[in-house]
Amino acid sequence: MGHEFELPHEATVGATPEEVWEAISTGPGIDSWFMGRNEIADGVVRTAFGPFDMPPSTVTGAEPLRRFAHASDKGDDGRFVAYEFMIEGRERGSTLIRMVTSGFLPGDDWQDEFEAMSRGLELYVATLAEYLGHFTGRAATPLTEFGPPVTDWPDAWKRLNAALGGPPSPGDRVRFGPGDRFEGVVYHRNSQTVGIRSGEAMYRFLQGFGGSMTASHLLFVSADDQGPAWRAWLADLYA
């Protein structure tokens, strides 16, 4: 059957329109708050989420400091996703960002994918605001690692919450990760995601639609090849 959707989000950030434009319309900028590694070349946005290449997305509008939009081609089943960002400068160096994600999800099981997309977008928008509030002008190195397959999501979240010292709420300070050596403040949480900010990184955990807990971190210092350590930590957590 499938489902057409439109998901609007907005945030007011303490950054200039120039800083917002850099974050939404360049590969290094998008790397610093969205998913995976991104590049924009020849009018096409390409995203690699771990080993997976997302469908390329063609730039459909680029009005510097005002609007940036791109959309994937429609597949044979009608699937596509489009993103539109509108920015408006406000007083005292702040900016209003409006982001609208729209498209079509095919199949009779579109509800689960729509739920995962909705919760994920909430995290990404919160991360964009957090990036512009704390890391503006810096480029992150994305780190994406997948845990073992999950068949019981309530249990999976119970284990992760325990590793964070209990079910966290925004504003809580938590310690976690390989060697229990990472510490930060929770900046976002919903039913399928949690985001934690430290002084040099943003650590994010997502309920992967493919069936595994996903670490989708953004590192603003040398990664020091942290990938294997996080992969092992997830494997131990869900052994």
Image: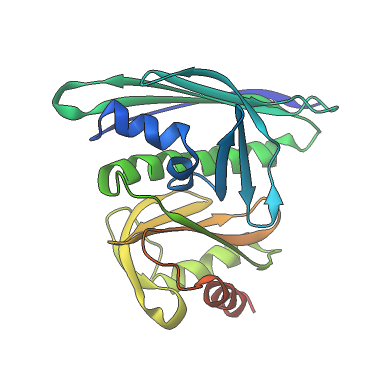
Quadrant assignment, res 65: top left
Task: Tell me: 2 left or right of 182.
Answer: right
- The answer to whether residue 60 is above or below residue 150 is above
Q: Residue at x 14, y 27 (%)?
A: 92
Quarter containing the C terminus: bottom right
Q: Position of residue 32 (x, y in %)?
A: 43, 47
- The answer to whether residue 20 is above or below residue 84 is below
Task: Tell me: 1 left or right of 130.
Answer: right
Q: Residue at x 54, y 63 (%)?
A: 157
Residue extending furthest right?
Answer: 76
Q: Residue at x 48, y 47 (%)?
A: 31
Residue extending furthest front?
Answer: 42
Q: Position of residue 234 (x, y in %)?
A: 57, 73
Q: Position of residue 135 (x, y in %)?
A: 30, 49
State how the image is colored.
Answer: rainbow
Asked if residue 196 shows in the view, the reply is: yes
Quadrant assignment, res 71: top right
Quadrant assignment, res 198: bottom left
Q: Residue at x 42, y 83 (%)?
A: 179
